[in-house]
Each structure stands twice: as structure tokens, then as C-alpha cells.
């Protein structure tokens, strides 16, 4: 039995088990609770697909026919191009049928009135575990069929990875967006109309350039200007932190690395609140400056200036996490060669080191640009009267406007800016080679920064560090006072109310924050490794594989990162609140949102890191007989440890600190920490909210340290051999 038949047997067996033993439709109590096993025979909704088909669900019959065809192809045809083509058509037909019948038949029968001419049909719930496994099986048929046809050199692992990622991106990125944009062309009575879109797309409040003549700019240009400023600031600061941490003799490097992570592990509105208490109209620093100067600062913090400060504070750590691996990956031998040819440190840094960091700088700028445009928490707290695209979309959907057409237009403008930045980045890096890590060891040491660079970046890093420490001292202080800003009497009441524990008649979690805390930890620890795995696998495919539609595929991935969380949350509600996929109120919808919202960071970090890995490493492994999967696992991943750490850290903390999407997706059973904190702030419980945030910060620091120990460091240099004195014998 050859390899083609073995993997096809496994997929067919998996499909048969799903049809015979697993519920075809969604289990309301949750599949992984396994409470459905005892009720399977008594409740028709829990019956497997074979029983459903035998009892009148005719829409499952084509699935059975196509699976039977796959079995016949396995038993009656030898592996080859002819069988491969038939498997591709079988898998594609199965996916198409599942999509059509899932969208056509809802809970009460036909979803569209025109289909009623075909006759009555019984309503069906959303797809369950059995149906989802059949979807995966049909996807595998497409991948294995293409492998038998010789596509991508017959590499089934690569084809399977591409097929699976396309399925996931279509399901969790495009389908929600299509559901939301479809609603933009619907009137309140359900009829389709384009009036709302045509009216909003030419609105001067979006495109006005009045700021050039002393007036106010439209929300589109205001957001674009803010994103450019934020991306520039975060990239320069991130590079400064990375250089100080790797290329100077700065004595507090470990503390510096910890400090750069602090802003990203803090809920955005908490940073905005701390900035308000420091620099707002009645802030501590504002009062001190006014007392010293005798002037009045006013409300300068509220607007683009305040948003920019908060965004730079929040997103610089992301830039640092991307750039630290890139700076470490610059080959010391190239820098030593430059200095050997009598180039000074400044010329070496400017002509050799900095150009080799171009992929990381471009990716850091792109991430900063997209993060700024998609940010929701900071503009909501500090925006004042000057809104940005993300907040305008939020108010267009949930505010008094109730205008989904306007929200769709604004989201399209946001995507246009984001994809334009992506194209500009691709054009700048096109045709350039930045590989510095090959198959040979590198025994050199990284060159130290020249004095004209070391001193300015160190001063900037120290100044920004002091500012960051001041912000966090304000946050920490707010958790130990009775009423922040009014009564500064010290107290532990906020922490006791949030995280109290009782030992009477056993161990009891009496604090009001425990339920949301444990839920948040579970979902974050599940979504973080999934996000890192999917993101780095995608990065490997983008950098190392050539397949049709790769550029479009990469664009699609960036779309999920570019869209504001408010739009993501609303689109998920509209897409997954009804069959064929119903996930609202479950943990699965939160995990899916986090994975596909944060995956592009892992993708961009992996792309930047793999741009420095010579392709000969893969070729050598494949030449020695290793499969693509083994090469990825044993050769590429060990060299991507900084990118792995960045993806794990970012996805974990974003799962905990995300606000805009989560606030639409939480439920009474699965309530996330940020949504709970927002409720505390709305009720005026600022002390408990800050105490909760402080505990989350400490927990995230601990978990990040655990990720660092688990992933380890990447070794790119040969360790210096210890020379033992040789014993001389006569």
C-alpha cells in the first residue's frame, strides 16, 4: 500500500465514523461536554448523519453519494492523475453542496421564498461535529487529489495546509464580512436597495480636505494621518528599544524587555484613563505644570494628540517584538567584513546593518499602521469630538444612527487604506534579498552601535521608559485608594471585593471577578498556540511556496487584521447567529475571533524572520529525503523562536485585553475580563476595575515568562569552545 492510499484511507475512515457515530447537527449543550452521548437515541437532533438521511433528511443524501464515490475511487482506481482529478471534483462538489444546502435551509424551512416552489422542507439546525468533519474530509479530497495530479511536486502536506487555510479564511474572514455587507444593501423590511451606500460614499464628512484651508478634515484623512504618525513613532521607538537591548552595554536589558511588554498587556481604556489622570484637564502633571508656569494647558490631550500618545505607548511593544528577532538575525560576519575593509561603526551600521533590517522595519511599520487604523479603545477614551474610522463605524451600527450602509462604507475605506499600505510595503521590498542566516555557523559577535547612534537611542529609551513607568505607577496607585482623584486614602477593599477567597467549609472563590477571570484564562491559553501555529504555517507557505493566488491569499489574511474589532464582532454576530454555523454564546466563537483577528501578527513576524533564512536550508533537508512537514518541524521552526514567542505573546495578551470585538461576543456563561471591566467602569467602580487590571497585568507577565522559558532562544552562532589546557607528556 503506497502513501497516497494510506492517507486516503484515513480520511475515508474519519468520514465514516463521523457519519455513523457523531451528531450531524449542533449540540446545544456543547459537543465537548459529552452529555449528548446519553441522549443521542432519544433526541432526533442528536442523531448521526446516516440516521438523519434514513429518516427523511434528503439533503444529506448527496453527501453519502459523494463519499461512496470516493470509496469507489480508492478501491477501483490506482493512484494517478485520473484518480486525482476525480477526487478534486468529488471534494469540490461536496463542499459546494454543503454550502448551498446549509444556506438554503434554515430553522423553519427554506430561507428564501423562491425556493418554496420546490416543495416543503423540514427546518434544520446548524451544522454539528459530524457535518464539520465531512467538510474537512471533502477539503482533504481536494488536496490529495491535487497531490496525485502532481501539483506543487505532489507535496500533500503543502497542498493540505493550503486547502485547510483557505477553508478557514473563507469561513471566518470572508463569510462574516459578506454577511455584514449584505445587510448594508438591505432596507428595514428586508428588501435590497443601494440608496444608503450611494448616499454615504460621497459624504463630505468622510472625504473633506478642509484642514488644508484651516477647517476640519474628513474622518478618512484624519485616520490616515494618525495611522502614519503612529506607525512612524512605534517603528522608531521599537527599533531604538531593540538596538539598546542587543547592541549596547545598557545595564538593565532584562528590565527593559519587561518594560516594553507592559503597555501591550494593559486594557487600552486603562492606559487612556491613566493618561487622563496625568495629563488631562485636572491631571496631576497638568496641575504641576500650570502651577510652575502660571499658564493654562486646556484640553490639549483630547483629540488626535492624545490618541497618538496612547497608541504609541500601546503599540511600540508590538514593533519591538517584531524587530528584536530581526536585529538579532543580522549576520555579525557581514559587519566584521565591513569593518575589516576599514569602514567605521557608523558607516557599517548605515550601509550594512540597517539595510539588512529592512524587512523587519517594513513589517513593523505596516503593523503599526494597521493597529492604529483598527484601534478602538484609545480613540473612544481620548478622541473627544474628533472621531476616527473605528469609532465612527461603532456609532453608525450601535448608536442612534443605526445605519449599516454607512458602517459598510467606512469599513471599505479602512480596508482601502490598509491594503494600499500593504501594496506599498510589497513594492518597496520586491526583488531584494535579505537572507543572512545560511547553513553554516556564524562565530562572530554583533557589532556595537556607534556612539552617535548609541547615545541618542539610549536617551530616548530611558525617557520613554520613565514615562511608561509613571503611567503604570498611576494605574497601580489607583487600585489602592478609595476614590481615584478624590479620596486617596489607602485601602485593600478593591482587591478583596474582586478576588476574595473564603476558607469557611471549604475553598470558595468569593470575589466578583473570579468567573470572568477563569473564563478569560482558558480561552486565551487555547487561542494563543492556535494563533501562533496558524500564523507561522501561513508565513512558511507565503515565503517558501509558490501557488496560484498566493498574493490574494495574503491580502485576505491582512483583511482580518485591518478591520476594526467592532466590525469583526458585529459581522460574527450576523454570520454565526443562525445556521449553517451557529456559534454565538459559545467559547468557540471567541476562540475563532481571536485566532483570525490576531493571526496576521504571527504571519508578518514569521515572514520577516524567514526572509533572513536562506532557502538552501529547506532544499538541503528535502534533498536528504525529509518531507516538507519534517523540514518545517525540524529545520525551520527552531530558527523561528523569536517569531514563535512574538506570536504566542501577542495572541495571548490580545485575547485578554481585546475590547471592541469581545463586547459583542461575550455571554453570561463566557464573559471575558475586558467586558467585565467595562461594566465596572460604566457602573462607576473604578477602583475594582483598576485592581482587576493590575492583577491581569501580573498574571500576563508570569505567563509571558513561561512562554519565554518554553520556547527558548534561537541559536544562530557557534558557541565559543572552551579551550582546556593540554596535558604534556614526555
Image: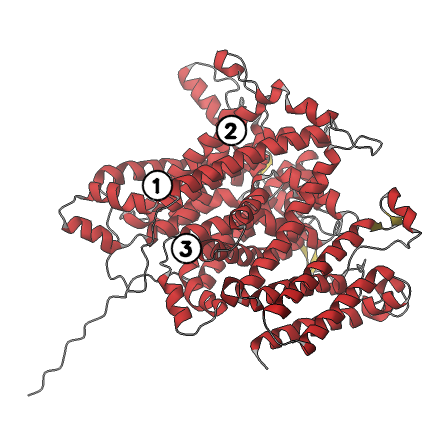
Crowding at mark 2 (Cα within 10 Å: few <14, some 14-19, many 20+): many
Q: Give x and y (percent) for residue 251.
A: 30, 49
Tell which circle, 3 or 2, labels the residue nearer the N-terminal end: 2
Distance CA(mark 2)–CA(mark 1): 24 Å
Q: Disc 2 vs disc 1: Cβ atoms closer than 8 Å?
A: no
Q: Nearer the viewer, mark 2 or mark 1?
A: 2
In whole angstroms, how far apart are the C-alphas of marks 1 and 3? 22 Å
- Extreme residue toward the bottom, this view: 730
Whether residue 278 is visible, yes or no, is no
Horizontal side, residue 534 vs residue 645: left or right:
right
Q: Secondary structure at mark 2?
A: helix
The answer to whether residue 444 is left or right of residue 691 is left
Question: Residue at image x 50%, y 52%?
Answer: 602
Reply above or below: 682 against 573: above
Across the whole image, how many numbered discs are drawn on residues? 3
Disc 3 from disc 2: Cα separation: 30 Å
Q: Which residue is mark 3?
A: 610
Dot 2 corresponds to which residue?
Answer: 224
Examine the image and state in which quarter residue 563 appears. Answer: top right
User: What's the colour scheme?
Assistant: secondary structure
Q: Which mark is residue 240?
A: 1
User: Which element is circle 3 on?
Assistant: helix
Amino acid at each position: 500500500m503506497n502513501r497516497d492510499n494510506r492517507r486516503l484511507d484515513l480520511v475515508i475512515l474519519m468520514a465514516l465514523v463521523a457519519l455513523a457515530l457523531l451528531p450531524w447537527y449542533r449540540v446545544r449543550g456543547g459537543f465537548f461536554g459529552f452529555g449528548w452521548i446519553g441522549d443521542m437515541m432519544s433526541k432526533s437532533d442528536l442523531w448521526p448523519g446516516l440516521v438523519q438521511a434514513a429518516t427523511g433528511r434528503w439533503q444529506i443524501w448527496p453527501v453519502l453519494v459523494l463519499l461512496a464515490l470516493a470509496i469507489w475511487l480508492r478501491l477501483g482506481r490506482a493512484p494517478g492523475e485520473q484518480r486525482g482529478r476525480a477526487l478534486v471534483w468529488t471534494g469540490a462538489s461536496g463542499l459546494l453542496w454543503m454550502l448551498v444546502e446549509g444556506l438554503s435551509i434554515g430553522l423553519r424551512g427554506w430561507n428564501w421564498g423562491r425556493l418554496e416552489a420546490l416543495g416543503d422542507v423540514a427546518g434544520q439546525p446548524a451544522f454539528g461535529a459530524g457535518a464539520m468533519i465531512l467538510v474537512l474530509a471533502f477539503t482533504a479530497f481536494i488536496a490529495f487529489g491535487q497531490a496525485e495530479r502532481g501539483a506543487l511536486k505532489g507535496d500533500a502536506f503543502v497542498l493540505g495546509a493550503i486547502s485547510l487555510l483557505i477553508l478557514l479564511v473563507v469561513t471566518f474572514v470572508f463569510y462574516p464580512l459578506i454577511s455584514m455587507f449584505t445587510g448594508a444593501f438591505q432596507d428595514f423590511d428586508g428588501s435590497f436597495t443601494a440608496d444608503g451606500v450611494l448616499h454615504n460614499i460621497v459624504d463630505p464628512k468622510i472625504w473633506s480636505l478642509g484642514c488644508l484651508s484651516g477647517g476640519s478634515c474628513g474622518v478618512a484623512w484624519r485616520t490616515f494621518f494618525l495611522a502614519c504618525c503612529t506607525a512612524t513613532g512605534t517603528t522608531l521607538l521599537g527599533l531604538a528599544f531593540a538596538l539598546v537591548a542587543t547592541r549596547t552595554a545598557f545595564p538593565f536589558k532584562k528590565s527593559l524587555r519587561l518594560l516594553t511588554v507592559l503597555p501591550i498587556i494593559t486594557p487600552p481604556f486603562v492606559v487612556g484613563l491613566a493618561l487622563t489622570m496625568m495629563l488631562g484637564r485636572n491631571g496631576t502633571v497638568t496641575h504641576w505644570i500650570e502651577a510652575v508656569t502660571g499658564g493654562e494647558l486646556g484640553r490639549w490631550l483630547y483629540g488626535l494628540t492624545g490618541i497618538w500618545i496612547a497608541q504609541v505607548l500601546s503599540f511600540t511593544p508590538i514593533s519591538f517584538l517584531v524587530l528584536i528577532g530581526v536585529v538579532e538575525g543580522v549576520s555579525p560576519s557581514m559587519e566584521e567584513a565591513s569593518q575589516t575593509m576599514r569602514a567605521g561603526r557608523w558607516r557599517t551600521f548605515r550601509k550594512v546593518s540597517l539595510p539588512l533590517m529592512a524587512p523587519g522595519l517594513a513589517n513593523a511599520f505596516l503593523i503599526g499602521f494597521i493597529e492604529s487604523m483598527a484601534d478602538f479603545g484609545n480613540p473612544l477614551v481620548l478622541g473627544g469630538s474628533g472621531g476616527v474610522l473605528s469609532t465612527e463605524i461603532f456609532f453608525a451600527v450601535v448608536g442612534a444612527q443605526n445605519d449599516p450602509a454607512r458602517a459598510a462604507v467606512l469599513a471599505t475605506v479602512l480596508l482601502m487604506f490598509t491594503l494600499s499600505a500593504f501594496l506599498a510595503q510589497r513594492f518597496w521590498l520586491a526583488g531584494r534579498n535579505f537572507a543572512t542566516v545560511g547553513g553554516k555557523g556564524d562565530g562572530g559577535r554583533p557589532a556595537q552601535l556607534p556612539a552617535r547612534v548609541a547615545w541618542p537611542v539610549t536617551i530616548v529609551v530611558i525617557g520613554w521608559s520613565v514615562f511608561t513607568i509613571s503611567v503604570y505607577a498611576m494605574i497601580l496607585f489607583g487600585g489602592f485608594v478609595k476614590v481615584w482623584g478624590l479620596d486617596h486614602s489607602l485601602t485593600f477593599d478593591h482587591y478583596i471585593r474582586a478576588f476574595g477567597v473564603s476558607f469557611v467549609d471549604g475553598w470558595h472563590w468569593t470575589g466578583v471577578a473570579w468567573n470572568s477571570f477563569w473564563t478569560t484564562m482558558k480561552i486565551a491559553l487555547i487561542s494563543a498556540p492556535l494563533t501562533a501555529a496558524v500564523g507561522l504555517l501561513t508565513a512558511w507557505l507565503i515565503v517558501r511556496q509558490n501557488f496560484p493566488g498566493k498574493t490574494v491569499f495574503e491580502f485576505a489574511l491582512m483583511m482580518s487584521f485591518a478591520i476594526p474589532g467592532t466590525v469583526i464582532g458585529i459581522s460574527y454576530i450576523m454570520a454565526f447567529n443562525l445556521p449553517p454555523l451557529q456559534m454565538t454564546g459559545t467559547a468557540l466563537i471567541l476562540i475563532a475571533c481571536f485566532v483570525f483577528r490576531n493571526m496576521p501578527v504571527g504571519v508578518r513576524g514569521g515572514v520577516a524572520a524567514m526572509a533572513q533564512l536562506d532557502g538552501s536550508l529547506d532544499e538541503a533537508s528535502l534533498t536528504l529525503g525529509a518531507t516538507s512537514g519534517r523540514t518545517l518541524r525540524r529545520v525551520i521552526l527552531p530558527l523561528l523562536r523569536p517569531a514563535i514567542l512574538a506570536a504566542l505573546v501577542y495572541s495571548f495578551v490580545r485575547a485578554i485585553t481585546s475590547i471592541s470585538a469581545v463586547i459583542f461576543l461575550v455571554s453570561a456563561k463566557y464573559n471575558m475580563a475586558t467586558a467585565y471591566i467595562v461594566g465596572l467602569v460604566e457602573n462607576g467602580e473604578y477602583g475594582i476595575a483598576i485592581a482587576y487590571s493590575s492583577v491581569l497585568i501580573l498574571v500576563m507577565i508570569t505567563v509571558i515568562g513561561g512562554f519565554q522559558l518554553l520556547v527558548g532562544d534561537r541559536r544562530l552562532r557557534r558557541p565559543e569552545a572552551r579551550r582546556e589546557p593540554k596535558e604534556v607528556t614526555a
